[in-house]
Amino acid sequence: MNLTCETCPVKDSAACSVLSIDERDALAAAGRTRMLRRGEMLFAAGDDMAACATLISGALKVSAVDREGTEQILALVHPSGFIGELFAPFAHHDVVALTDSKLCTFARADIERAIDTYPALARALLRRAQEDLLATRNLLELTGHASAEARLAALLHDFAAAASTSPCHLASTFDLPLTRGEIANMLGLTIETVSRKLGEIEECGAIVRKGKRGIEVTNAELLQSLSGR
């Protein structure tokens, strides 16, 4: 089915938000919606890069697997994030749904045509690519130098920011899209350390855990302070 921009929850934050209504409608006519279940793969390393996508809801991970079969999570994709390597002949990494997710997908030829037609879209995608690069550099710096507590607090802070409907405030509640094992993998920690530090962050009053994956941010300023940001 064709995309319906009017009711899209990321219409004001996705790269296509820079387009006029008519331009967005023209782009949407070339798009399709796709649903992924948790664990389902969007792209696999080595796939012909014939499509791109904007994440509408849910969460994705970008990961690589080494020769021993060990996965390394390289990045997370949150709603309004753009997925796809426009200038590569094939995908370099796996992209997998962390939760049930909804996406707008486009053939790469359609996106390339839209970039040529709408310079504002090209600038928006370039800006998003720069933001993704900065996030990757921040993750490398975090895992290389920060304490275990700061690493976990920063990740929780980022999850709360991604779940928020406002750029100025963190979401008060959100669900962790990663298992503790995946968090340990991403932050270079052990599962035991993740569990212990999560408990310590709760004990100091920054968060409250709700069930298996739920997190309530009870003190956003403290959470940010613990992250060292």
Image: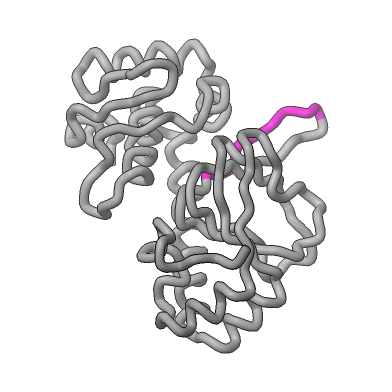
Q: Residue 129 location, x and y as percent? A: 51, 64
Q: Which residue is drawn at 63% across and 43% down?
A: 36
- Where, quadrant-wise, is the C terminus in this rendering? top left
Magenta residues span: 68-76
Q: Which of 45 and 81 lies nearest the eye of the viewer?
A: 81
Q: Is residue 58 magenta?
A: no
Q: Would residue 122 be found to the left or right of residue 47 on screen? A: left
The way the protein has been coloured in the rendering is one colour
Q: Which residue lies furthest to the bottom in this view?
A: 117
In the displayed structure, would residue 92 be above or below residue 49?
above
Q: Which residue lies furthest to the front in this view?
A: 1
Q: Residue 223 location, x and y as percent? A: 24, 31
Q: Would residue 169 be found to the left or right of residue 42 on screen? A: left
In the displayed structure, would residue 24 be above or below residue 190?
below
In the displayed structure, would residue 200 be above or below residue 85?
above
Q: Which residue is drawn at 76% across and 35% down?
A: 66
Q: Residue 91 location, x and y as percent? A: 74, 56
- Where, quadrant-wise, is the N terminus in this rendering? bottom right
In terms of image quadrants, where is residue 69?
A: top right
Q: Which of 154 and 43 lies nearest the eye of the viewer?
A: 43
Q: Which residue is drawn at 71% across and 76% down?
A: 109
In terms of image quadrants, where is residue 151?
A: top left
